[in-house]
């Protein structure tokens, strides 16, 4: 493995989220599609894409980790956003299926952008709270085969494994 490959893997391992819309393409086009989808959802409900709502969505798009409601509020309150605005906007983003939540190690929901991203599961560190995304094609295939065999039609599933991340394991006394 080259130094470059090792450095890339290390950089990716330090982030929780990776930009990887299933449709491919550039980040700018992806951002436009998310804004358009959210604006369309809001319009169907008699609402509009305000500057505050756009700012919250943009904050998600710049994030490299799963965000709690409090993370978003603390980062954006200097722009005049209140807790209620953040809460309501998160609810609308989930209703529009643009974001999804994962329950962290403390029971607090943490959110991630969901649109056009490939299916993935989560490894959740119970010590530091870090959430890592993983993809297991072989496991997905086993699930699909099993469901097909027994005539079960799955709608969705979620795998969350709780444990300790590499950094917390290293810090633990021996």
Image (spheres, rainbow, N blue to C red):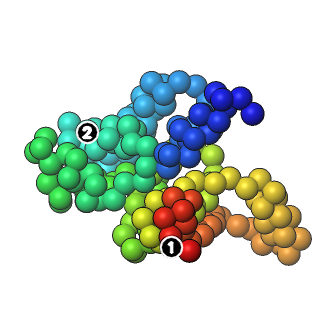
Name the foreground residue: 104 vs 98: 104
User: Is residue 132 toward the left or the right of residue 149 in the image?
Assistant: left
State which mark lies toward you, 1 or 2. 1
- Tell whether label 2 touches label 1 (CB within 8 Å): no
Looking at the image, tell me whether mark 1 or mark 2 is earlier in sequence order. Answer: 2
Name the spot of residue 117 as percent of width and height, x first. Answer: 57, 44
Residue shown at 48% from the left, 27% from the top = 27
Residue shown at 20% from the left, 42% from the top = 52
Q: Quadrant of the C terminus?
A: bottom right
Residue shown at 39% from the left, 42% from the top = 63
Q: Quadrant of the N terminus?
A: top right
Q: Residue furthest front?
A: 174
Question: Label 2 belongs to which residue?
Answer: 55
- Report crowding for label 1: few under 14, some 14 to 19, many 20 or more residues within 10 A (C-alpha): few
Q: Which mark is residue 173?
A: 1
Secondary structure state at the residue bearing disc 2 = helix
């Amino acid at each position: 493995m080259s130094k470059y490959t090792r450095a890339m893997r290390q950089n990716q391992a330090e982030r929780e989220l990776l930009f990887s819309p299933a449709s491919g393409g550039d980040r700018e086009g992806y951002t436009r599609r998310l804004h358009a989808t959210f604006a369309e959802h809001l319009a169907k409900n008699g609402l509009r894409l305000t500057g505050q709502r756009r700012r919250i969505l943009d904050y998600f798009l710049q994030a490299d980790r799963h965000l709690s409601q409090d993370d978003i509020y603390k980062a954006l309150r200097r722009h005049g956003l209140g807790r209620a605005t953040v809460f309501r906007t998160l609810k609308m983003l989930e209703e529009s299926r643009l974001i999804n939540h994962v329950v962290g190690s403390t029971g607090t929901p943490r959110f991630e952008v969901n649109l056009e991203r490939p299916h993935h599961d989560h490894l959740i560190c119970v010590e530091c709270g870090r959430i890592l995304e993983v993809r297991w094609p072989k496991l997905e295939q086993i699930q699909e085969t099993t469901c097909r065999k027994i005539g079960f039609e799955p709608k969705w599933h979620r795998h969350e494994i709780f444990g300790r991340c590499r950094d917390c394991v290293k810090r633990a006394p021996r």
